Image: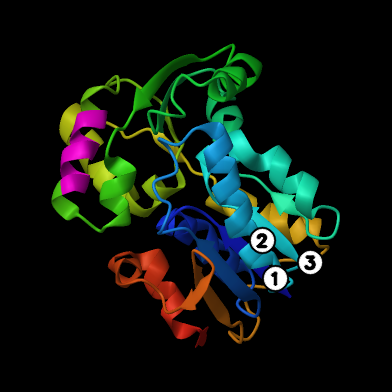
Amino acid sequence: MKIALMDSGIGLLAATAAVRRLRPDADLVLSSDPDGMPWGPRTPEDLTARALRVARAAAAHRPDALIVACNTASVHSLDALRAELEPTIPVIGTVPAVKPAAAAGGKVAIWATPGTTGSPYQRDLIDRFAARAEVTEVPCPGLADAVQWADDDGIARTVAAAAALTPTDVTDLVIGCTHYELVEEPIRAALRARTGGPLPVFHGSAGAVAAQALRRIGARPDPQAAPTGGLTVLLSGRESALPAEVLHYADGRLLTAAPVHG
């Protein structure tokens, strides 16, 4: 079994780690685009062109499924990726977890990149699934970049700025960018410092997309499988080692036990 994941950068780590935990025996292909990142400021057409190149590099390794582990690429490029790769390779997009977060009708905050915040895509999710909830959209400029480069000072600064925009009484927090899932603890700490009270329930996407990828290829989770899965790393199409920044995060360090090709 081989699962590929794609993103502009290391935001794919959370979903990669989720796949690794569910199937330690799965071979993984990580395809990112350091030459073209960040994707967020690009036009939808330019972003889609870059996403297709990254997806083609992964597809050349003949995976059983491809996870688009990027909210921005899923917003703008998912249809184009599916049109090119399916049905040969199932393509699984990443959708902010608005539906489960809003299920109880509480007060929901959505942390996302400025490009996703307020987008028609996110607004449609809110209109469809959060009609009974009170929703605050929180743009987080600079946070994905700080996470990408393992910039702890930048992470602390941008997380604090987003926390200041988050109502103190939110019940649920949607993590609307895959990079942010790597810094859940700093986010918790910033919210705790701001409110001093109970923390909201966090809603990420990594576990859901990993499980969906297995379902699409007819595989079942087997966390006790032998940890025999290999790892191929593609940086703008070039086979490489894991970038050094990966090791800054627990989800990245989980991958170092796998043999790395490239």
x 28%, y 66%: residue: 248
Q: Position of residue 20 (x, y in %)?
A: 56, 70
| Residue 127 seen anywhere in this rendered image of the structure | yes
Identify residue for label 1: 60
Q: Nearer the viewer, residue 78 or 166?
A: 78
Residue 225 sits in which quadrant? Answer: bottom right
Identify residue for label 2: 56
Instruction: Give the CA distance from mark 1 to mark 2.
Output: 6 Å
What span is in magenta? 154-162
Question: Label 1 sits on what residue type?
Answer: Ala
Asked if 28 appears above or below 126 in the picture, the reply is below
Q: Which mark is residue 219?
A: 3
Q: Is residue 258 magenta?
A: no
**222 left or right of 88?**
left
Question: Label 3 sits on what residue type?
Answer: Ala
Q: Nearer the viewer, residue 137 or 195?
A: 137
What colouring does the structure picture have?
Answer: rainbow
Mark 2, other Cα within 10 Å: few <14 / some 14–19 / many ≥20: some
Instruction: Give the CA distance from mark 1 to mark 3.
Output: 22 Å
Overall secondary structure of the magenta section: helix
Residue 136 sits in which quadrant? Answer: top left
x 40%, y 68%: residue: 252
